[in-house]
Amino acid sequence: MALAHTILATLGNKAYSGYDLWKQFTECTNHYWQASQQQVYRELTKLENQGAIACEIIPQEGRPDKKLYRVTDRGKEILTAWIEEPSEPRAIREELLVKVLAASLIRPEVIIKELERRRQMHWEKLSACKEKERESFSEPSALSLEDRCVYLTLRRGIRYETEWVAWCEEAIAMLSNMSLEKPLVVAEDANEF
């Protein structure tokens, strides 16, 4: 999946400025796609050059003109063709899991502190997702197809964050029961194995 597809999907039938689109990324899609503000602006330029989006200039007094981007018919064709392609699961690249894997080298309290910090981060994201669910999707059966699709991605984010909180709690509990006082000594010479 490319950032271009995520931008086209996020725009949907709406018009967003580059900044508002980036805010959508930070608030709504961060559980499945992240992009910096610069990445979003760069991709908007590319999409506009390809004819996948159109830009409407809105004059503003005392501030630079606002650019609102919309998906064009060409953009919908690109997105539709991509949707019809099979998708494969992506490999996980999670730094915390590597740290936990090697945590026997340190005192358990050190990794527990990091697990507690990460649990808090995921709890905050989970709370934000649940708040958005309460505000925008209180009656799922009354949602339009477009809104149901958006809601499904939010539900995945809720499950993702819920699982992270649960796993952090499990790891904290398991490591808190350890009675190790010293870190594992690692052999300096690989030939000793």
Image: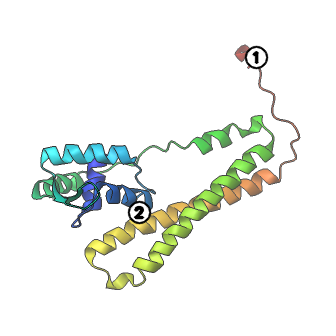
Check disc 1 and report its element: helix, strand or loop.
Answer: helix
Q: Quadrant of residue 166?
A: bottom right
Q: Position of residue 86 (x, y in %)?
A: 27, 51
Check disc 2 and report its element: helix, strand or loop.
Answer: loop
Determine which of the numbered discs, if any, sits on residue 192 in the image.
Answer: 1
Q: Nearer the viewer, residue 39 or 154?
A: 39
Q: Quadrant of residue 83?
A: bottom left
Is residue 2 in view from this perspective? no
Please determine whether, in this image, residue 169 is positioned above or below residue 48: below
Q: Residues within 10 Å of mark 1 (few under 14, many from 20)?
A: few
Q: Residues within 10 Å of mark 2 (few under 14, many from 20)?
A: many
Q: Which residue is mark 2?
A: 28
Residue most extreme to the front: 62
Q: Image point 77% across, 21% down: which residue?
A: 187
Q: Nearer the viewer, residue 51 or 9?
A: 51
Q: Image point 79% across, 45% down: which residue?
A: 108
Determine which of the numbered discs, if any, sits on residue 8 in the image.
Answer: none
Q: Image point 12% across, 49% down: which residue?
A: 51
Q: Of marks 1 and 2, which one's residue comes earlier in the chain?
A: 2
- Relative placement, left or right, of 116 versus 62 is right
